[in-house]
Amino acid sequence: GIGWVLVTDINKPDLQVSNVSLTSNTLPALASYSYQVSVVNTGFATASSGLLVRGYLSQNSIVDASDVIVSEDFILTSVPIGQTAVLNGSTTAPNLPGQHRLLFQVNPLVSITELLHTNNTSLPTIVDIVPDYTATAQVVDAHYPKNTPIPITGTATRSSSLPAANEPVEVYVITGGLRREVQTTTDDNGNYATSFVPLAAEAGHYIVGASFPGIEAIA
C-alpha cells in the first residue's frame, strides 16, 4: 500500500475531528437533537481557545457551497499538544427530509494557522431526517359539480401519537399527473380545514392527500 508522512520543523497546531456521536441517526425535522464532537491536536503547538466548529448537512463527504450549516459552536479552552477537546452541543434539524451526511469542520475560517487545513473535516455521519408528523385528508362526497370548491379536512399526528397542534400541513391534489398544493395550518387539536378550487373548465378524477410540508408526497 501507499501512505504519506508530513515532515516539518514548523511548530504549529494541527486540528482534526477525531469522533462524532449523536443521540440518534434518525432525526425528526424541526426537532432538537444533541451531538458530541471530539477535536484532537496532533500538531506541535497548543491551539488557542475560541476555535469555531461548524456542522454541515451535505450530500457528499466534502464541505462546499451547496451544504447547509446546521450548527456553530466554540471550543472555549485551549487544546494542548496531543490533547482532545470534547464539545457538546444541540441544534434543530432543518425541514429537509431525506438521507444526508453530517460533517463537522474545525477552524473553518482558518482563524489560526495549522500545519494542515485539509484534515479539519470529520468523516461523514449518515443521518435520516424524517417528517416530525404525518397528516390525513378526506372529503365528504365522491362527486362534485364543476366550479365548486371542495372542502378538505384532516388531522396531523406526531410519531408519539400526540396531535400536531398549530403546525403547517401541505394538502395536495393530483389529477392527470399534475400535483397542486394547498397550504394550511392545524388548530390546537391537530385538525385542519381548507378547500381546493378546481379551474373553471376542469373535470376528472382527483387524488387528495396531506403530508408534512416539502416532501412531495403523492400517496
Image (cartoon, rainbow, N blue to C red):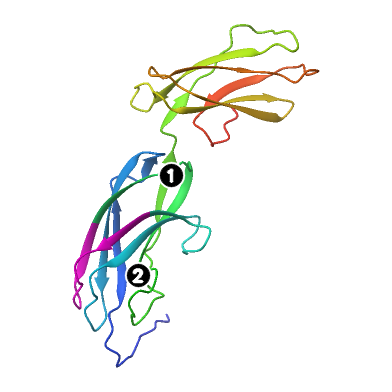
Write down the residue under mark 1: 94
**Depicted 90 relative to depicted 5: above or below:** above
Q: Position of residue 103 (x, y in %)?
A: 40, 59
Looking at this view, is 122 or 170 the one in front?
A: 170
Q: Reading the chain from its start, which is encountered first: label 2 or label 1?
A: 1
Whether the residues at callouts 2 and 1 have beta carbons within 8 Å, the answer is no
SS at badge 1? loop
Q: Secondary structure at mark 2?
A: loop
Residue at the image point whose x is 48% and y is 43% from the top: 96
Res 7 quadrant in image? bottom left
Res 110 → quadrant: bottom left
Amino acid at circle 1: Pro
Q: Residue type at mark 2: give it.
A: Asn
Kindly indicate the quadrant of the structure image that contains residue 21: bottom left
The quadrant in which the N terminus is found is bottom left
* Front residue (pair 177, 113): 113
- Magenta stretch: residue 74 in it? yes
Q: Is residue 130 above or below residue 35?
A: above
Residue 15 x/y as whole percent = 30, 73
In the rendered image, residue 170 lying in the magenta stretch gets the answer no
Pointer 2 local density, CA inside 10 Å: few below 14, some 14–19, many at least 20? many
Residue holding disc 2: 107
Residue 217 left/right relative to 178 = left
Question: Real-space Cα distance between discs 2 and 1?
Answer: 23 Å
Q: Please give left or right for residue 194 compared with residue 1 in the image.
A: right
Locate residue 63, reporting x and y percent. 46, 64
Which residue is found at the position 50% from the left and 16% from the top? 154
The range drawn in magenta is 71-87
